[in-house]
Image (cartoon, grey):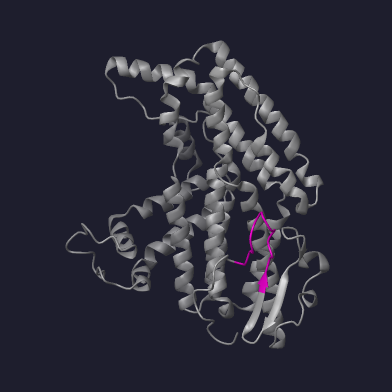
């Protein structure tokens, strides 16, 4: 950690993305902002008295968000600056180095919510270009770390759903320029076909690094306990009696060898993804979930815990839904731009998109497009027995369209 801090000092003004993201995270913990967030979420017990100037416990949601505007703008600016910078300093290899974890998952979610609330204010102020930039900044922030493992991936998917929800609720407000930006953004996301493989492989690499250092960490804990020092928390699974039986070097090497076999087999499966049509990915990705090395009895519990980390979410379904929604964003942009230009919706989707763009790999048929008296319906039919119907934000619109449909 000392090396990290020294390196950041040498960099001078923010040149590393983590500096910007860390500074934004600190704004979340400013006393008055924390109080306003508690009011925003209806957590009124134990509020300080008096409240910060301009705040009241019964303020409507958007009034609280308006009160936060200055801080929200600072957070957005820092995150957007971070999005433009590289990660110049890589984290240490030690997965137990909690000091490196500048941002917790909760910080990540709160930063995304702050940027999205900034976008909502911009929409109220009819500054749709600002709202568009903020929404895309929130997605970029999550997406650049999305392949670090299943935890980050689920947070990234949650961010995407929130961003698309705001777009869906305010479709009639966006200009042709805004829709151009959304279309381009969706097309860039769809180019990244190897994301699912990176998520799995980074999970596996992290597991191996964790296991490599468990004997050392376990022995360090034992030494701290005997000396009266407080043990460092590393999770219940890692301090269970089962692992006590596995601290011999030979057994640890055996387990690492088995995980390396698992890794190599998974890698072989993943490398085929780019060579296959997306509609067939279902048959590749689940195989990564069920491949499990044969292990001797004492290794079994350890491997079961580790493999469960890959199985805790249906990543393949999340990937299919996410990519279907990016396609729906692109197609909605085409439909909306057609209406802005000709004052009517296209009679058929093929009038604004190519045959390939109209095809939905999830349902293995064209996207469903229907003109309605008050607008249109555009969805993926999903895949029976696997994933249900998918819409842009996968929920009904929360607002009636403002202005003409």
Q: Is residue 264 above or below residue 352?
A: above
Q: Is residue 73 above or below residue 127?
A: above
Magenta stretch secondary structure, dominant: loop
Q: Looking at this view, is 240 or 57 the one in front?
A: 240
The magenta-colored residue range is 378-392
Which quarter of the figure is the N terminus placed in? top left
Query: Residue 13: in sight, yes or no?
Result: no
Residue 311 position, x and y percent, is: 58, 40
Residue at screen point 67% across, 47% down: 195
Q: Is residue 22 above or below residue 367?
A: above
Q: Does the magenta stretch include residue 389?
A: yes
Q: Residue furthest front?
A: 385
Residue 323 position, x and y percent, is: 67, 57
Residue at screen point 55% across, 86% down: 403
Residue 369 position, x and y percent, is: 71, 74
Q: In this view, does 99 lie to the left or right of 332?
A: left
Residue at screen point 81% across, 45% down: 275
Which quarter of the figure is the C terminus placed in? bottom right
Q: Is residue 184 left or right of residue 32?
A: right
Residue 363 position, x and y percent, is: 73, 60
Residue at screen point 64% across, 75% down: 177
């Amino acid at each position: 950690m000392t090396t990290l801090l020294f390196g950041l000092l040498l960099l001078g003004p923010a040149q590393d993305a983590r500096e910007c993201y860390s500074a934004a995270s600190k704004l979340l913990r400013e006393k008055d902002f924390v109080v306003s967030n508690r009011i925003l979420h209806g957590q009124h017990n134990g509020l300080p008295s008096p409240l910060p100037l301009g705040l009241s416990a019964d303020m409507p949601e958007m009034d609280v968000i308006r009160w936060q505007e200055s801080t929200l703008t600072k957070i957005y600016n820092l995150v957007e600056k971070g999005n433009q910078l590289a990660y110049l300093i890589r984290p240490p290899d030690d997965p137990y180095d909690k000091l490196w974890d500048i941002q917790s998952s909760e910080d990540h979610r709160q930063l995304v919510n702050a940027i999205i609330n900034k976008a909502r204010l911009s929409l109220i102020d009819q500054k749709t270009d600002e709202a568009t930039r903020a929404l895309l900044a929130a997605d970029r922030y999550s997406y650049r770390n999305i392949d670090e493992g299943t935890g980050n991936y689920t947070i990234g998917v949650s961010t995407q759903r929130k961003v698309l929800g705001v777009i869906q609720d305010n479709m009639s407000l966006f200009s042709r320029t805004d829709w151009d930006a959304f279309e381009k953004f969706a097309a860039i996301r769809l180019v990244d076909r190897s994301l699912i493989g990176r998520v799995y492989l980074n999970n596996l690499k992290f597991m191996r690094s964790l296991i490599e250092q468990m004997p050392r960490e376990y022995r360090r804990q034992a030494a701290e306990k005997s000396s009266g020092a407080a043990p460092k928390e590393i999770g219940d699974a890692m301090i269970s009696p089962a692992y006590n039986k596995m601290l011999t070097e030979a057994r640890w090497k055996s387990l690492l060898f088995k995980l390396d076999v698992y890794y190599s087999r998974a890698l072989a499966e993943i490398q085929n993804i780019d060579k296959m049509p997306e509609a067939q990915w279902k048959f590749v990705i689940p195989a990564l979930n069920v491949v499990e090395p044969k292990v001797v009895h004492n290794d079994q519990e350890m491997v079961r815990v580790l493999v469960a980390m890959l199985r805790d979410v249906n990543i393949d379904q999340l990937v299919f839904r996410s990519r279907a929604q990016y396609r729906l964003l692109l197609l909605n942009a085409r439909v909306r731009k057609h209406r802005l230009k000709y004052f009517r919706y296209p009679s058929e989707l093929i009038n604004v998109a190519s045959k390939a763009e109209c095809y939905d790999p999830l349902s293995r048929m064209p996207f469903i497009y229907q003109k309605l008296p008050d607008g249109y319906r555009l969805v993926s039919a999903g895949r029976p027995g696997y994933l249900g119907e998918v819409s842009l934000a996968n929920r009904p619109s929360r607002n009636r369209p403002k202005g003409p449909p």
